[in-house]
Amino acid sequence: MKFYRTLHPRPVVIIGSGNIEEGEVNFMACSWITPIAEDVPAVGFACDKEHFTHTLIKKYKEFSVNITEDINLIWKVGTSSGKEVNKVSTFNIKIKRGKALSVPLIENTLASLECKVIREVEVGEVVFYIGEVKSWEASDFDEYGYKEFWRLPLHKGGKAFTFSSKKFYLPK
């Protein structure tokens, strides 16, 4: 049994790395991601040092966070290596350049964030990247997040995914 399963299911996203203008683009699945701060809008995620994503983030110092309900795409980019395959062409991923940064964004997602790396923390086999959110957009969103919250996939582990089904509001 793995200790971190006590924190699952977790939202699962696709991290984009590289630089569209330079023609270097990669995507990886990630559920080890969290908001960090609001005053400096920041998110952080853990990336294995062996991943191609790590190589590209070290080079360009930026990344994107793409939130999609497409668990098939999440699985494909999460189980293949960008060192061995061009994921954009192999999986027919429609991409666009970020508005603030040259990071790759996936078209038609629930949300996307463009992040500039402001800190890197090495812990064991991973680097925890903290990125300042320079631009973001989300569809069908209100003060509590996604209006259709059940569309956000959660990763339980391995091939197991789930979606939320209930929303509760506490009485005032």
Image (cartoon, helix red, strand yellow):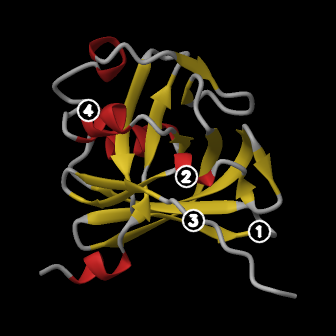
Q: Which residue is mark 3?
A: 166
Q: In the picture provided, is 31 more to the left or to the right than 84?
A: right
Q: Verify CB contact (< 8 Å) between mark 2 and mark 1.
A: no
Query: Can you tell which mark lies on residue 113?
Result: none
Q: CA distance from mark 4 to mark 2?
A: 21 Å
Q: Nearer the viewer, mark 4 or mark 3?
A: 3
Mark 2 or 1, which is nearer the eye?
2
Q: Mark 3 or mark 2: which is in front? A: 3
Check the image and name the residue furthest to the left.
1
Cα–Cα span, label 3 and label 1 = 27 Å
Mark 2 secondary-structure assignment:
helix
The residue depicted at 76 percent of the width and 47 percent of the height is: 141
Which of the pair 63/150 is nearer the observer?
150
Q: Nearer the viewer, mark 4 or mark 2?
A: 2
Residue underneath mark 2: 150
Q: Earlier in the sequence, mark 3 or mark 1?
A: 1
Give coordinates of residue 149: x percent, y percent: 61, 53
Check disc 3 and report its element: helix, strand or loop: loop
- x and y, in percent, of residue 52 in the image: 28, 38
Q: Residue at x 35, y 71 (%)?
A: 8
